[in-house]
Image (spheres, coloured by chain):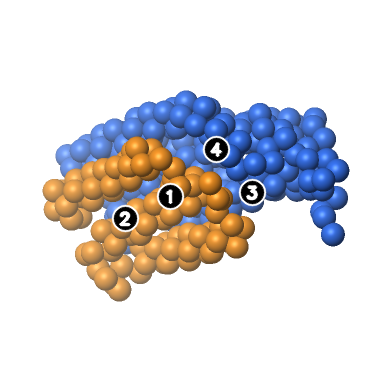
């Protein structure tokens, strides 16, 4: 019994063959991957900048880092990896031509991902209401700059997820072009996740507690 | 090109969740491995990052050059953080 969304004989999806997907990957994905690698390289340089400045005053950096609440970092990581899982499931559904399922996973990924934004705003609010800002010391300059830059990437990813959800809703099935956009958006979203996986331990967990 | 199956995606996610909870707990209970906790936590972060790159981003099936670029990024980022932590006296 074919799935009503995936009846290949009655209504074949536009991306029926893996070969077609592979060709599209070769044509479109390099641009996205170049952007992602370049962006990640910039973040890597910022990691080095943070660690080099940390060497100049380890005590100050450690005393500041210990004031960060690890629970926020753990919660944010769990939110991003869970949202990332839903994006993987969305890509798999899109690959199978399952439009409704794809939209469902994209929506779930967006809603779970929104939790990161809420958590980050609460964390920033607590810090700022305690008088801790970028001007407090070099550690917090890096803290706000790095997590702020990451937050802007997060906002971009959320917009991408919303746009993909709308685009997938405009078609009867998932076209090759939309699939390609979904896959590109998914790669970007995973990059947001990946950068946080390094930012969290570097900012929160290097300090002896 | 075959994708990461839904089942395997859930397994990778379970690893990421377990590693996150484990390293978060370890960082707050440094008595367990003491001085080496920071190093251990960064190596766990590398393993998590590599899992995201290879499986969620499907780099394990990407052309060699792309896979290499991501592998290099993960190794360089981890080595830079761990190496500079070490030069700072491992504190």
How far apart, in angstroms, are the residues tagged by discs 2 and 4?
A: 35 Å
Q: Secondary structure at mark 4?
A: helix
Q: Nearer the viewer, residue A109 or B31?
A: A109
- In this picture, residue A94 sits left or right of residue A199: right
Chain with colour orange in the figure: B
How far apart, in angstroms, are the residues tagged by discs 3 and 1?
A: 16 Å
Residue on which the image places disc 2: B42
> Residue A55 falls in which quadrant of the image?
top left
Looking at the rendered image, the disc whose residue lies closer to the viewer, 3 or 2, is 3
- The chain letter for the residue carrying disc 2 is B
Whether residue A156 appears in this view of the structure is yes
Residue B64 in percent (x, y) is at 36, 42
Residue on which the image places disc 1: B60
Residue at image position (34%, 30%) is: A42
Give the vertical position of A140 relative to A90 (above or below): above
How far apart, in angstroms, are the residues tagged by discs 1 and 4?
A: 15 Å
CB contact under 8 Å: marks 3 and 1: no
Q: Secondary structure at mark 3?
A: helix
- The chain letter for the residue carrying disc 1 is B
Whichever of callouts 2 and 1 sits on the residue coming sooner in the sequence is 2
- In this picture, residue A50 sits left or right of residue A196: left
How far apart, in angstroms, are the residues tagged by discs 3 and 4?
A: 14 Å
Q: Quadrant of the C terminus of chain A?
A: bottom left
> Residue A70 falls in which quadrant of the image?
bottom left
Residue on which the image places disc 3: A92
> Residue A134 falls in which quadrant of the image?
top left
Return the mark for residue A197.
Answer: none
What color is chain A drawn in?
A: blue
Are both tags, 1 and 4, on one chain? no
Residue A103 in percent (x, y) is at 74, 42
Looking at the rendered image, the disc whose residue lies closer to the viewer, 2 or 4, is 4
């Amino acid at each position: 019994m074919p799935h009503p969304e995936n009846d290949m004989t009655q209504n074949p999806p536009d991306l029926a063959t893996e070969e077609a997907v592979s060709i599209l990957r070769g044509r479109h994905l390099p641009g996205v991957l170049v952007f992602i690698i370049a962006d990640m390289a910039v973040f890597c340089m910022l990691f080095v900048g943070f660690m080099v400045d940390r060497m100049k005053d380890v005590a100050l950096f450690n005393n500041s880092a210990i004031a960060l609440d690890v629970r926020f970092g753990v919660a944010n990581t769990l939110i991003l990896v869970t949202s990332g899982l839903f994006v993987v499931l969305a890509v798999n559904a899109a690959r199978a031509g399952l439009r409704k399922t794809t939209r469902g996973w994209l929506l779930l990924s967006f809603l779970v991902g929104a939790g990161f934004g809420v958590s980050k705003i609460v964390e920033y609010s607590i810090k700022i209401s305690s008088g801790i800002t970028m001007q407090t010391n070099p550690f917090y300059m890096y803290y706000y700059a790095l997590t702020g830059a990451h937050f802007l990437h997060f906002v971009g990813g959320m917009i991408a997820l919303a746009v993909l959800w709308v685009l997938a809703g405009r078609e009867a099935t998932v076209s090759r072009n939309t699939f390609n956009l979904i896959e590109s958006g998914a790669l970007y979203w995973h990059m947001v996740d990946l950068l946080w996986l390094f930012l969290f331990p570097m900012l929160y967990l290097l300090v002896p507690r | 090109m075959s994708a990461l199956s839904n089942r395997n995606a859930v397994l990778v996610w379970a690893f990421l969740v377990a590693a996150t909870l484990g390293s978060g707990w370890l960082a707050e209970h440094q008595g367990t491995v003491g001085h080496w906790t920071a190093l251990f936590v960064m190596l766990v972060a590398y393993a998590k990052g590599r899992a995201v790159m290879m499986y969620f981003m499907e780099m394990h099936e990407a052309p060699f050059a792309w896979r290499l670029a991501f592998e290099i990024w993960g190794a360089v980022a981890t080595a830079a953080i761990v190496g500079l932590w070490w030069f700072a006296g491992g504190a």
